[in-house]
Amino acid sequence: MEREKIAILFSGGLESTALIKYYKNKDITLIYLFFGYVWEDAEFFHAKKIASKYKLTIDTFDLSKIINTIQLGNVKNLKENIIPLRNLSLLTLSSLFIYNKNIYKLAIGIQGNLEYPDTSKRYIKNIEKLISIGLSKSDFQIEVPFYGKKKEEIIKEYSLPLELIFSCTNPINYKRCHTCYKCKKLDYLIKKYS
């Protein structure tokens, strides 16, 4: 029997890595989109290591030269890391990509942090509805299985390779800076759960 297909927006961060384990019984396609942000090369470098650990590869979609997104640099806090239309861009462009592969389910590891303007369930459901209409695929779904969960809960529920997880807004030579707000949170979690 053929396994159900699902695509995962994959960054090598905690939530997207947990999605691999969450969907372990499905036929998984990992997707990474390049927009031109300063952390992407380092993030993708580490994402490939995690994908390899699970015997998966990552399909990439490079929009950095087409969109010409202004790069965020030296991000110090969450507010500075709010990227206009981030999830709308990720979800719609990924949907086009996976549609050509006959995949009609897309997972994203958002937790519903309402400090970001584009992570509410209503926002995601509206995107799902519009993509379904645009693709003429009424069965197209965007799944957010970790919505409402804390990072600590996700770590406890899934045995994750915390030493490989990468989350940093200002990487230095492909390594985490350990000073940005994302690194501080990840360092705390690694120390607590390793």
Image: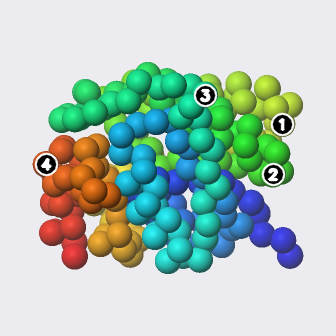
Q: Are marks 3 and 2 in contact (CB under 8 Å)?
A: no
Callout 2: SS:
loop
Q: Which label sits in the foreground, 4 or 3?
A: 3
Q: Are marks 4 and 3 in contact (CB under 8 Å)?
A: no
Dot 4 crowding, Cα within 10 Å, few <14, some 14–19, many 20+: some
Residue 65: quadrant of the picture: top right
Query: Is 35 rendered above or below residue 49?
Result: above
Residue behind mark 4: 179
Residue behind mark 3: 66
Q: Earlier in the sequence, mark 3 or mark 2?
A: 3
Give the residue type that dot 3 points to: Ile
Give the residue type that dot 1 points to: Lys
Going 51% across and 25% down the picture, which residue do you hit? 68
Q: Position of residue 111 (x, y in %)?
A: 40, 45
Q: Earlier in the sequence, mark 2 or mark 4?
A: 2
Q: Which label sits in the foreground, 1 or 4?
A: 4
Dot 1 crowding, Cα within 10 Å, few <14, some 14–19, many 20+: few
Distance in Å between CA atoms under marks 1 and 4: 44 Å
Callout 4: SS:
loop
Going 46% across and 36% down the picture, which residue do you hit? 36
Give the residue type that dot 2 points to: Lys
Q: Quadrant of the C terminus?
A: bottom left
Q: Earlier in the sequence, mark 1 or mark 2?
A: 2
Distance in Å between CA atoms under marks 4 and 3: 31 Å
Q: Earlier in the sequence, mark 3 or mark 1?
A: 3
Give the residue type that dot 4 points to: Thr
